[in-house]
Amino acid sequence: MERELTAGAIKDRRILDGPVTPVLFSVALPLMINNLINSLYNLADGLWVARLSLVEFAATSFVWPPHYLFVSLGIGIAIAGTTIISQLI
């Protein structure tokens, strides 16, 4: 008896067996859109803060590296935790 493939199984097969360029683009497109939206948000935020004064704008630029350090650590811990949990299941 043959098993029917679900939409998720077909997508998994396409990722594994499909042509590299379209598959890579389909995986990367949501990330590119997310980065574009995030950049536009940061640009609008920077323009709004720059209207207040130069000191406030400089403060946001000063805090940016430590902020992304903590964000990166959080993402790394989340990825590591997901990997460990998936191996234990």
Image (cartoon, rainbow, N blue to C red):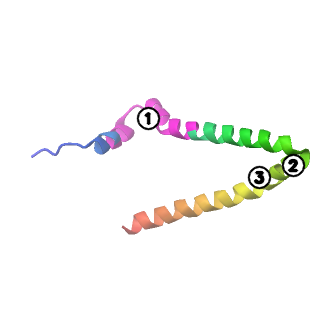
Amino acid under label 3? Trp
| Mark with earlier residue (1, 3) | 1
Q: Label 3 belongs to which residue?
A: 64
Residue wearing tag 2:
58
Which residue is at a point 72% across and 39% down the rendered structure image?
A: 44
Among the two numbered marks 1 and 2 on one chain, the one whose residue lies closer to the N terminus: 1
Q: Where does the image place residue 9, in percent across and percent down from the top left?
A: 29, 44
Residue sitting nearer the eye, 47 or 6: 47
Q: Earlier in the sequence, mark 3 or mark 2?
A: 2
Is 28 magenta? The answer is yes
Examine the image and state in which quarter residue 54 appears: top right
Q: Tell whether position 1 is magenta.
A: no
Pair 3/2: label in front: 2
Q: CA distance from mark 1 to mark 3?
A: 34 Å
* Residue placed most toward the observer, 72 or 46: 46
**Magenta residues (range):** 12-33
What residue is disc 1 on? 23
User: Residue 84's x, y, as percent?
Assistant: 47, 66
- Residue 42 pos. (x, y %): 71, 42
Residue at 51%, 39% in the rendered image: 30
Asked if the residue at tag 3 contacts the one at tag 1, i.e. Cβ–Cβ closer than 8 Å, the answer is no
- At mark 2, the secondary structure is helix
